[in-house]
Image (cartoon, helix red, strand yellow):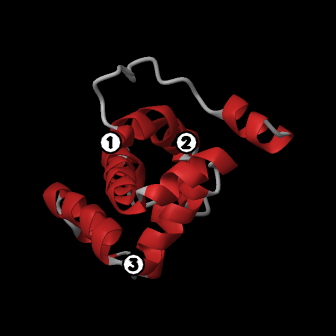
């Protein structure tokens, strides 16, 4: 294993709740061994990217109800291809060469799993997307 691959794997957080067994599909195994740790590692970057997305779309997100905000996040991830591809790149860039080879064998199914994990991560951090308060001079 080259130093890049080794470094990438060492940086990833361990997911203690991820189960691996012989009965699971290759996609589920990839999700638990690769996608979950990478997405957790990239959490801060994913949040920053969504904050930027909100700003680029005229901050309409801030005027929405909680349910509409949740729908907004889901639509941004599933319907906005440019944003979706940007998020995918943030995750794919953390793959080792071997993981990338496995990914391209079944990228369609793995992309669905990846985007669902990213969506769930953003939804679970929805409180971080409150409108930033402006400081006023005293």
Residue found at x 33% / y 50%: 113
The front one of 92 and 123 is: 92
Residue found at x 71% / y 39%: 8
Mark 3 or mark 1, which is nearer the start of the sequence?
3
Category of crowding for the residue at label 1, using alpha-carbon neighbours closer than 10 angstroms: few (below 14), some (14–19), many (at least 20): few
Label annotation for residue 81: 3
The image shows residue 17, relative to residue 7, as above or below, that is: above
Q: Does any portion of residue 78 appear in the rendered image?
A: yes
Query: Tag 2's secondary structure?
Result: helix
Spatial CA distance of label 3 from label 2 is 21 Å
Label annotation for residue 38: 2
Query: Tag 1's secondary structure?
Result: helix
Mark 1 or mark 2, which is nearer the start of the sequence?
2
Q: Position of residue 20 (x, y in %)?
A: 39, 22
> Residue beneath label 1, please?
124
The front one of 62 and 138 is: 62
The image shows residue 125, relative to residue 86, as above or below, that is: above
The image quarter in which residue 111 lies: bottom left
Query: Tag 3's secondary structure?
Result: helix
Q: Position of residue 119 (x, y in %)?
A: 33, 53
What is the quadrant of the N terminus in the image? top right
Q: Does any portion of residue 134 appear in the rendered image?
A: no
Mark 2 or mark 3, which is nearer the start of the sequence?
2
Spatial CA distance of label 1 from label 3 is 22 Å
């Amino acid at each position: 294993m080259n130093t890049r691959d080794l470094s990438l794997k060492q940086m990833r957080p361990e997911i203690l709740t991820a189960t691996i067994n012989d009965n699971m599909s290759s996609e589920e195994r990839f999700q638990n061994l690769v996608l979950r740790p990478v997405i957790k590692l990239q959490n801060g970057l994913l949040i920053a990217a969504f904050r930027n997305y909100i700003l680029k779309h005229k901050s309409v997100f801030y005027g929405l109800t909680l349910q509409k905000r949740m729908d907004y996040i889901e639509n941004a991830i599933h319907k906005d291809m440019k944003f979706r591809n940007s998020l995918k790149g943030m995750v794919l860039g953390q793959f080792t060469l071997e993981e990338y080879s496995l990914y391209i064998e079944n990228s369609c199914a793995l992309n669905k799993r990846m985007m669902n994990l990213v969506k769930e991560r953003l939804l679970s951090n929805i409180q971080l997307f409150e409108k930033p308060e402006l400081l006023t001079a005293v």
